[in-house]
Amino acid sequence: MYNLHDKLHKVHDRVHAAATLAGRSTKSVQLLAVSKTRPASSVKALYEAGQRIFGENYLQEALEKQSLLSALDIEWHFIGPIQSNKTQDIAQHFSWVHSVDRFKIANRLNDQRPIDLPPLNICLQVNVDNEASKSGLDLHHQDELLNLAIAVSDLPHLCLRGLMAIPMACSDQHKQREAFAKVATAFDCIRSSLNKLGIDVSAFDTLSMGMSGDMEAAIAEGATIVRVGTDIFGPRNDQ
Ligand SMILES: *Cc1c(COP(=O)(O)O)cnc(C)c1O
């Protein structure tokens, strides 16, 4: 457990160093601990070290952990691919969804969000490298992205917060930054287009990008949420 605390603090140090280098405040970057495949006991250990926001990819696994940890005030973020038959549970059990890439899913989440809960925070997932294997809207079709952003803005039980991206893994920092810069540019375009249409963009403030291998580059390009699993919890079995 102490090992987990050490790793968490090392990641905090990296976030702090990257933010400082970019002339940003450390507070402007939130650390989302990605706990997919990790046991509830590890989530609890991180909670005890002060971590409050956790990201999960697999619904069933997430629901099990949430019920074991229901006494803790954790903010849960869903970051995995979404099938239609999962939207009801996601709408009921999460505060954020980072991986929305089509209207059908957004509309279902809106319809199924319990009205006694605040609006569900939404990021639209974009596909930077146009990889067929990855979900997300193609960044080359920004009109589609804008249309989805407009449509989601109109759904009363959702709150459109920004964009999420998972660029191709690569170890070259310049290439990493290039990919993140494209997402940041798309974010600025969407924000100003929405604003011109008279849509309130005060909550459109989130760039969810950067993982264990590229969080420094993401922070340099404006990430406001970095999603980190491996460098906090250690390697996963699937890695
Ligand atoms: C697994 C995952 C992460 C964390 O990746 P690490 O390389 O383990 O830090 C971040 N975002 C998404 C969408 C993921 O699926």
Image (cartoon, grey):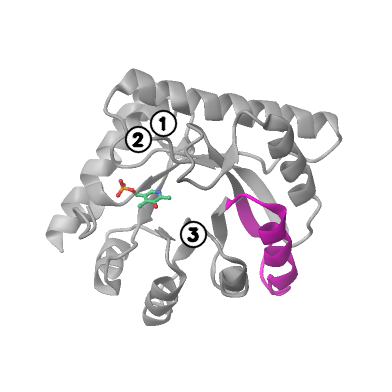
Q: Kindly indicate whether the residue at mark 3 contacts the one at mark 1 (C-beta within 8 angstroms).
A: no
Which kind of residue does numbered mark 2 sit on?
Met
What residue does disc 2 label?
215
Question: Mark 3 falls on what kind of element?
Answer: strand
The magenta stretch spans which residues? Answer: 100-122
Within 10 Å of disc 3 (Cα), the crowding (few <14, some 14-19, many 20+) is: many
Nearer to the camera, 129 or 64:
129
Instruction: Indicate which disc, 1 or 3, sits on the residue closer to the N terminus.
Output: 3
The kind of secondary structure element at disc 1 is: helix
Residue 58 % position (x, y): 42, 66
Whichever of callouts 3 and 2 sits on the residue coming sooner in the sequence is: 3
Q: CA distance from mark 3 to mark 2?
A: 18 Å
Residue at x 67%, y 31% (from the top left corner):
141
Q: Which residue is rendered at x = 27% and y = 35% of the image? A: 14
Counting from the top left corner in percent of width and height, residue 160 is at 68, 48
Q: In the image, 205: left or right of 198?
A: left
Position of 221 compared to 50: left or right? right
Residue position for label 3: 77
User: Farthest residue toward the right?
Assistant: 198
Are the two marked residues, 1 and 2, in contact with CB atoms closer than 8 angstroms?
Answer: yes
